[in-house]
Image (cartoon, rainbow, N blue to C red):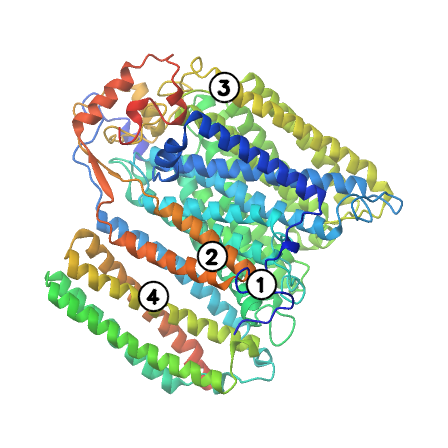
Amino acid sequence: MFVHIDGPWSPLLGRLALSEIPYNNPILIGTFAFAALLAVVLVGLVTYLGLWRTIWRDWLTSVDHKKIGIMYILIGLVMLFRGFMDAVMMRAQQAMAVGPHSAGYLDSPHGYLTPYHFDQIYTAHGTIMILFAATPLLVGIMNILVPLQIGARDMAYPYLNAVSLWLTAAGAALVMASLFIGDFAHAGWFGIVPVMELPYSPGVGVDYWMWAFQLSAVGTTLGGINLLATIVKMRAPGMTWGRLPIFTWASLSANLISLSTFPVVTVALALLALDRYFGTHFYTAGLGGNLMLYNDLFWIWGHPEVYFVILPAFGMISEIVPTFSEKPLFGYLGMVLASLGIAGVSWGVWLHHFFTMAASPAVNAFFSITTMAVGIPTGVKVFNWAFTMFRGRLRFELPMMWASAALFFLLVGGLTGMMNAFATNDYMVHNSVFVVAHFHMMLLLIVYAIFGGVNYWFPKVFGFRLEQRFGKMFFWLFTAGTAVVFIPMFTLGFMGMTRRLAYVAFPQWGPLLDIEVVGIAIYVLSAVFLVAQLYVSFRDRAKNRAGLDAWETSRSLEWMTHSPVPFYNFAVTPEVHARDERAWRVARGVDTVRPERYEDIHMPRNTAIPLWLGVLSFGLAFGLVWRMWWLVEVCAVAIIALVVIRSFDHDTDYTIAAKEIERMERAIRDVPSGRPAADDVIGGVPAFRQGV
Amino acid sequence: MSATTSGTLDAKKSPMWSSGHGHDVISTKTLGFWLYLLGDAMMFTALFAAYAVLGHAFNAAGGPWIRTVAHAGVAFRETAWLFASVLAYGFAMMALKKGNRGGVLLWITAALLIALGFLAVDGHEVMALFRMGAVPERSGFLSAFFTLVLYHGLHVVVGIAWMLVMLVQVASAGLTEKVVYRLLNLRLFWHFQAVMWVFMFTFLYLRGAIV
């Protein structure tokens, strides 16, 4: 039944053999040594501080949306680092491998990476940055904020939320495993067909890519269902659609995209899996396959995915700008319609990723026009932010700096995007680094919004503000690095340099590639300041203790509960009266009104099942990659068994008595604002810990 | 807009914190299941799109073509089994409405057995096709055809397994809130796969008879 594979195979280890461990590659050995050292240090530190119990009880088994959000963000940051290191390696290779006389090291004809290794690195860079950095970071932020912004206790399905997290984590772990066991795909992050088919990629690289992608896609789809149901069903009384905070609207739009398009990529990849495992002919070059089917299915997901990551970024900018302009958001309704409009039009633009694939002029014209139409709702947003700032009392604190710089990238990325939207022009720049520079502008806009959002909501989640001096140096260096990398890249694109070059044939491109390396070095330097910012913030956390409203001019619901947020979010569900409820209460002097009485709260119980489901999914995917059928069978049966066993568990919730809530609330109020407590960092004073 | 009208509210008199506010568990779970069905419908849509793309004579690559593999008569029999099972599940829901635990158990068992009948016909048909050499790896067209048939079949298998679990839960726990929302979601699921079957009957089998 399974398609025959050449090469060794054993029932126990499948295709895995010692020769698959790249012990002869000094780069990978160095990486492994670094990762192992880091792991040893972390494990040692956790053991030394005696934190295993806390990590297990309060984090790994948690179903609390804030903790799940933080864990999503941690995964995102780790993978962001990995993706960034890939970028550093690519920049170094392209700068070294210029011209026929350039030196070659480590078995490579030019530079230090063999073409096959270089191909894996750009594939990993793209896959990681989109699926395992941007997506988890934004999903994490949505996880934390949406329930708080609508006055809910948790997500609609806290258990499912944890399952989504651990599926994403399993996918990320699979990508990391491919570094040291076997290799990764070499066919680009979006998969070039038929290169991904078994005859052209007989190794396990494509399988790693495919199953990691699949795990993350399923996790994100389930997360999308959860966020949509939360926004529809869990809003506090009075939180009408017209009062929904703008970030929540953005999350709603984004998750409409994720729910409607991630299943399509699941199918696209499943059909590829059928081709690779059962020998079907969906995307093959012969026997009735059609490789354009893959391109269409993939990009029907791929382009909406871009808006799935950009809409929450827009949402964060829309929250930050009013706070630091000390004005309500200009054009709320326009903003909501623009978000939904972007989500809607995202479905009709996918073909612009392959204008050059010989569709008829009428088809190309249609997709040109729809692509340009994206500029309309986006323009509405830009003008709304500008008018929000107009005559506002602008305060350029860190979140505002990141948010306003993001607008600049939106401008550069958007205008170059308009250039690419012309099918005729796209024939000129297709597959050039001009396109690469364009979409990096858009993704950097997202990164800027994420950094802005992290700085903005950090005090809400952890109870203390991030330090600003190192933070600003990080900001300026990061911005400088961006300019020095991407201005030469745009230029090189105009000069005709194509993507994915392991060897650069034209020596005249060399100087610009060298400048890009300088830019990457500035990025590396900036990361030092980020670490310094985090360290100093943590050291001085007692000094930077934040109250309810860390920025004093915040407007929405999440700023009405304690910082850090207690595990039950709001002691009593707030009654919502206005769009910017916090600002409304402050303006009327009722922001200090406390609940008259407390009520019992029902909370979901922690469970380790989602974690095990993640571990088993990893085992399932790993077994599929290496064709260890026994592992696949064991994991599949165990997953089904766990799901069924969980459905028989009647003890999934518990109740906290009103008296207990009152005691905890009083304990919080009595804490002097400057109290330096270690527990501040992981979710509040002891009374806030679940189960105490 | 609500924001402007709320300005006229007297802030000092209106309540700041709500009381006695709870969420309806069953409707929340059901909404989530509807959303899941939307995602699943997208998966079927993508598979139908793949079938449309690969459903041309040259995609058969000289192998068996649609008239040889799509038998509308057999598919009609399968439809009858499937709809009968959905009907039986509907009776289980009527029993649920009356709180009749025995009725629920009886009719779900009936739905389950009839669904097994569908699977028998479906499996027999697929096996017969395999034996005559119409296998998924023969051509792009057959790959798309069998993927749709088997993806729908997978839904029926999952539905049957779910019914088995629900039989145990109804028998052991009774009609608790958790059991009821699962029964309702299973109803949605069972109707959903039947609806998808209607599309398959039309696009695979009826269209196959006239192409």
Q: CA distance from mark 3 to mark 4?
A: 51 Å
Nearer mark to the viewer, of 2 and 1: 2
- Mark number, residue A272: none
Mark 1 surroundings within 10 Å by alpha-carbon count, few (fewer than 14), some (14 through 19), many (20 or more): many
Q: CA distance from mark 1 to mark 4?
A: 28 Å
Q: Report if the CB atoms under discs 3 and 1 are less than 8 Å apart.
A: no
- Lower sequence index among marks 3 and 1: 1
The residue labelled by disc 2 is: A620
Mark 3 surroundings within 10 Å by alpha-carbon count, few (fewer than 14), some (14 through 19), many (20 or more): many
The residue labelled by disc 1 is: A294
User: In the rendered structure, the residue with mark 3 lies on which chain?
Assistant: A
Q: Position of residue A147 (x, y in %)?
A: 34, 37
Mark 2 surroundings within 10 Å by alpha-carbon count, few (fewer than 14), some (14 through 19), many (20 or more): many
Report the side of A150 relative to A317 (left or right).
left
Name the amino acid type tagged 2. Answer: Leu
Find numbered disc 2 in the image and state the secondary structure of the residue it sits on.
helix
